[in-house]
Amino acid sequence: MKRAVSMKDVALAAGVSQPAVSYAYNKPSEISEAQREHIFAVAKKLGYPGPNVRGRSLRSGRVGAVGLMIMDELPYAFADPATTCLLRGIGEISELANVALALFPLQKDLANHAGDAENGSLAVRGFVDGLIAYSLPDRYPVIEVARRQGIPVVIVDAPIIDKVPFVGIDDLESAIVQMRHLIELGHRRIGIVADRLRPDGFKGIVTRQRFQEATENVVRARIDGYLHAAEAVGLGFDDLLIVEAGGFDRASGIWAAEQILQHTGLTAVAATSDVMALALVQAARERGVAVPDRLSVVGFDDIPEAAGAGLTTIHQPLIEKGRQAAQLLSELLSGPASRKPRVPRVLLPTELVVRSTTQAPAAAR
């Protein structure tokens, strides 16, 4: 029987070291692109199929996969523009080019502390080598279980946990800028559309108690920013109409928009995401409410669709978030277990992008 071609055979034929062949398949950033292509060409000529993943896993204790825990059900990852940008950024990191990516949807029973995270989540049952947690509720128990088990974790946006690497933005300060834009235009009768304050199925008018019980840090921080900016001109919580959509998709945004549009005295609305803002623009125009002549709308995220719609919004580097998180996770996975990992907190810049959905209210023009 003909002997199978080994990594050592490829190294000898290519005139490189065996580690160089390993790098070509597992750590492409460690060698030049030309050397990597040369190794692959020799491997193809010899009929070498690449490293044996199962054998490598048994020897190294690695399974060759990382996980992304998302804030909603699985279809959300493929429909939400911000999440698809994050995924694109993760996929652009060459160190993870040969690693599988597993998606883990939010388990609402665990988010509401009604289940067993240790046995109820596949994310901590040996299927991945590391995890990126994307905008999860406060005290989501799967993260703590992963840390106890020694699974490397990087957090994007939320929750903020001491001694866990974090990539995000300053949501509170960015939201202050967002609301201040409306105030500086002269708006005082302002509504707010929020995606979700906690994953319990609620949707409707947000009371003080509901806001205080919020577990979604990103939405909570953005509303907090709106309140800070409003207080500077004498507007309090009760002066702002806050509607919680109960979800992150366009349908939830349309529902919230319909509630907001029943209050005809409003002249402007700030939304905690572009998905909510664009749903509001759509619903307003369908009702004959001219944007921005009768209602100004400002969003948050600057998703790809925002520019085409002329949406005024807060730009954040969504793809770069994915790149930064993936790079940090790669460093955690590749570093020796004995080395104490660095615990960075990466805050990316944001900026207000003024387009055509905001202007001064009619009374100020």
Image (cartoon, helix red, strand yellow):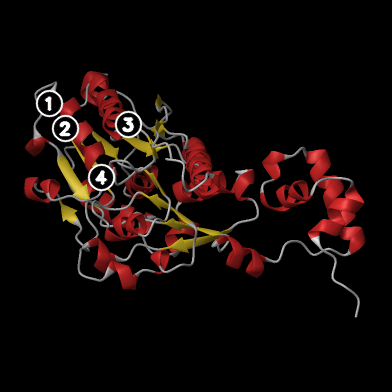
Quick one: 7 or 215, which is closer to the camera?
Answer: 7
**Residue at left offset 43%, top offset 34%:** 316
Crowding around mark 4 (Cα neighbors within 10 Å: few <14, some 14 to 19, many 20+) is many
Which numbered disc flags the more N-terminal residue, 4 or 2? 4
Crowding around mark 3 (Cα neighbors within 10 Å: few <14, some 14 to 19, many 20+) is some
Tell me the tag on residue 227: 2
- Depth check, mark 4 against mark 2: the one in front is 4
Quarter that holds the C terminus: top left
Secondary structure under the numbered disc 2 in the rendered image: helix
In this view, 103 is above or below 133: below
Quarter that holds the N terminus: bottom right
Crowding around mark 1 (Cα neighbors within 10 Å: few <14, some 14 to 19, many 20+) is few
**Residue at left offset 28%, top offset 44%:** 161
According to the picture, the residue beneath numbered tag 3 turns out to be 170
Crowding around mark 2 (Cα neighbors within 10 Å: few <14, some 14 to 19, many 20+) is many
Quick one: 43 or 280, which is closer to the camera?
Answer: 43
According to the picture, the residue beneath numbered tag 1 turns out to be 231
Q: In the image, is 93 to the left or to the right of 189?
A: right
**Residue at left offset 42%, top offset 30%:** 348
Marks 2,1: beta carbons within 8 A = yes
Quick one: 37 or 68, which is closer to the camera?
Answer: 37
- Depth check, mark 2 against mark 3: the one in front is 3
Which numbered disc flags the more N-terminal residue, 2 or 3? 3
Q: Amino acid at mark 4?
A: Asn
- Depth check, mark 1 against mark 3: the one in front is 3
Cα gap from disc 1 to disc 4, whole angstroms:
21 Å
Marks 4,2: beta carbons within 8 A = no
Cα gap from disc 4 to disc 2, whole angstroms:
15 Å
Cα gap from disc 4 to disc 3, whole angstroms:
11 Å
Secondary structure under the numbered disc 3 in the rendered image: loop
